[in-house]
Amino acid sequence: MTTVDTGTRLSPKQRKAIVAGTIGNTVEWVDWALYSIFAKIIAVEFFPGGDETVALLSTLAVFAVGFVMRPIGAAVLGAYADRHGRKKGLTLTVGLMAGASFVIALTPSYGAIGVLAPVILLVARLLQGFSAGGEFGSSSAFLVESAARGRRAFAGSWQQVSVGGGVLIASLLGTIATSTLDDQALHDWGWRVAFVLGGLLGLIGLWLRISVEETDSFTKTAASRKVNPLKAMVKEHPGAALRVAGITIAGTLTYYIWVNYLPTYANITTGIPLSQALLSQTLCLVVFVVLLPFAGLVSDKLGRKVTLGVFAGGFVVLSWPMLHLLDNSFLSVFLVQLTGMLFLLGYSANCAVIMAEQFPPEVRATGIALPYALAVALFGGTAPYVTTWLNEIGQRDLLWLYVSGSALISLVVYLTMPETKDKEFD
C-alpha cells in the first residue's frame, strides 16, 4: 500500500505510484487526442465527399457526441472506482480506450462500406467518451491520495502532465505523419498507423496499472463502504459537486481550444499549413508539460485560489488580443498558443487536487468525475464545433467573448470558494 505522509517529502512507494499513474494516464490520452489532431482527414475518410466544411463539422459533431458519454462513464466508472478501488477502475478505463482506438484504426472508409463507416466511428468515440468519463476521477483520486500532505497539488499536477504528455505524443505522431507522408499516403494509411500505435501504447498502460498497489485512503474505508457513491454525492455533497462544475468551465473550454484544437482552427481560419501548426502545438506542449509540476509546487506554497485566479483572470483580460493576433505565420500561432498554455498552468496544476479536496474518500472518484464530465461535455466537447461554426458564419470575432465569459464565471467560483491547501485529507 502507498504510505500517506503528513510532510512534504514523497516516499519511494508514493513516487512509484505517481510514476505508474502518470504513464498509464499518458497513453490513454494519446488515444483520445488523436481524433482531434486528424479531424480533417477523418472527415474525408468517414463522411460523404462534396463539401469539406460539412464533412468537418460532422466529424466535430461526433467529437462532441463522444463527450455525451463522459457523464455516463463518470457515474458508472466513478462509482465502480469508489466501490472496488482506484486500481480496478483505472485498469478498466485504459482497456476500453485502447480497444476503441484499434476499432477506429481498422474501420474501412465511407467509400468502402458507406454509412457503416461513420456509424462505427460514432460507436468507437462513444466508448472512448465512456472511458474518459471515468478516467479523470479515478486517476485524480489515485494520484492525490498517493501524495504527502504538503505535496498534494504537485502529485495531482501529474494527472495533467500525463494528459499533456498524451496530447504531446499524439501531436508528435501527427507532426511526423503530416511532414513525412504525401497526402495520398496520409489518407490511405498514415493516420491509421497513428491510431494503431495509440492502441498499443494503451496496452502498455494496462500492464502498468495492473502492477500498481491500491491507495491507503481507499483501503482504510473499503470494508465499511455500504453507501451508493452517486446517491451520497448528490444528497450529502451537492455544493461541492456544483463547485467542481464551476471550477471546470473555463479550464475545459480553454484547454480544448488552446491545447487540442488550435492547430486545426489556425489552419482553417488563417491558411497556415497544418504541419506548421502541429509543430507549434508540439513545442508549446513541451513547455507546458515541463512547467506543470512546478506550477503544482507553487499551488502547494501559495494556495489554490491564487493560482486558479491568475489563470482565469488572464483569459478574461487577454482572450481578445490573443485571438486577434492569430495569423498565418508560425510565430503568431506559436506565441498565441504558448501564452494561452502558460495561463492554463494555473488550472491544470490545480484541477485534480482542488476537486479531490472537496470530497471524502467514499465518494471522491464519483464526486470528481461526474460534475467534471458534465461541464466538459457542455463546454469542452463543444468547443471545436463552436469555434469552427463561428468562423463559418463569419463571426470569428465572437470567440473571444465566449472564452472571456467562461473565464469570468470560473473566476467568480475561484474567488468565493474556501481555500483547501491545508485541509485535512484522508
Image (cartoon, rainbow, N blue to C red):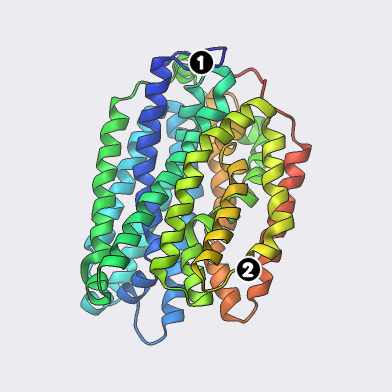
The mark found on residue 29 in the picture is none
- Amino acid on which disc 1 is placed: Arg
Tell me which residue sits at (34%, 76%) in the image: 44
Spot occupied by residue 41 in the image (x, y as percentages of width and height): 34, 71
Q: Foreground residue, 398 or 62? A: 398
Side of 285 relative to 151 (left or right): left
Residue carrying label 2: 325
Residue drawn 52% across the image and 39% down it = 291
Image quadrant occupied by the C terminus? top right
- Alpha carbon distance from label 2 to label 1: 43 Å
Image height check: is 49 above or below 420?
Answer: below
What residue sits 26% from the left and 49% below the top? 199
The x, y position of residue 251, in whole percent, is: 60, 49
Q: Earlier in the sequence, mark 2 or mark 1?
A: 1
Residue indicated by mark 1: 9
Marks 2, 1: nearer the viewer: 2
Which type of secondary structure does the marked residue at label 1 adopt? loop
Identify the residue shown where x is 30% and y is 53%.
100
**Other residues around mark 2 within 10 Å, as few (<14) / some (14–19) / many (≥20):** few
> Camera-side residue: 51 or 30?
30
